[in-house]
Amino acid sequence: MGLHDHRLVLLRHGETEWSKSGQHTGHTEVELTDAGREQAQLAAGVLGELKLVDPLVISSPRRRSLVTAELAGLSIDEVTEQLAEWDYGSYEGLTTAQIQESVPDWLVWTHGCPDGESVAQVSERADAAVTTALRHMESRDVVFVSHGHFSRAVITRWVELPLVEGSRFGMITASIAVCGFEHGVRQLRALGLTGQ
């Protein structure tokens, strides 16, 4: 088995009060809700069905990701800021509706965040994450435990689209996406898998 036989699996953290209310949550540490903890536990069943091959599990350092991984039955091999959520800068804790009161056409995918990360910076970080995954996929499956926007950024760059197209992919809390290959072409094999 080689690179084209292995998969990159993305698991978004479970529900938090801020994800529930639509508040942008980058570096702020927000605990999982009871529902979020249950979602993470249910994700274990989906991960089991995927029959992962010697998975290398890499997580964001945010507690919501670390706890989700643990509840989903994953053993974390590496923790890295490379998988942290988009740095929302001045927009941390705000909803899209609140931001659009002053910037009517704002989307994170087109505008980025003042005092935070630009679209180009997140695209570059997602490319680096994809490169990390590809290096390890020569011999095993890779699991990223991360966040909504950053997981969507990785999916977008995996399929070699510009980051603005990340708006077309959804990652609800504790959902799973599977990236892989078909005939040597990188593709999104599954999106939105949950045990819910």
Image (cartoon, grey):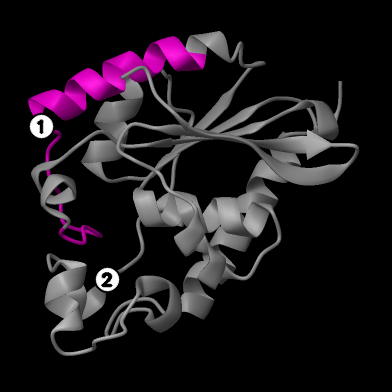
Q: At which x and y percent is residue 6?
A: 74, 27
Q: Is residue 34 magenta?
A: yes
Q: Is residue 25 left or right of residue 148?
A: left
The amino acid sitting under disc 1 is Thr
Q: Quadrant of residue 17?
A: top left
Q: Quadrant of residue 112?
A: bottom left
Visible residue check, residue 86: yes
Visible residue check, residue 73: no
Q: Is residue 173 magenta?
A: no
Q: Is residue 162 left or right of residue 89?
A: right
Residue at image mark 1: 33
Q: Identify the residue shown where x is 71% and y is 25%.
A: 140
Residue 196 or residue 59, whichever sits in front: 196
Residue 93 or residue 169, whichever sits in front: 169
Q: CA distance from mark 2 to mark 1?
A: 22 Å
Q: At which x and y percent is residue 44?
A: 39, 14
The amino acid sitting under disc 2 is Tyr
Q: Identify the residue shown where x is 35% and y is 26%.
A: 69
Q: At which x and y percent is residue 85?
A: 35, 56
Q: Identify the residue shown where x is 69% and y is 54%.
A: 159
Q: Is residue 124 left or right of residue 39?
A: right
Report helix, strand or loop for mark 1.
loop
Residue 92: mark: none
Residue at image mark 2: 88
Q: The magenta stretch spans which residues?
A: 23-47
**In the image, farthest residue toward the right:** 183
* Picture layout, residue 119 above or below residue 67: below
Q: Between disc 2 and disc 1, whose residue precedes?
A: 1
* Picture layout, residue 65 above or below residue 109: above
- Mark 2 touching mark 1, by CB under 8 A? no
Quadrant of the drawing holding the C terminus: top left
Quadrant of the drawing holding the N terminus: top right
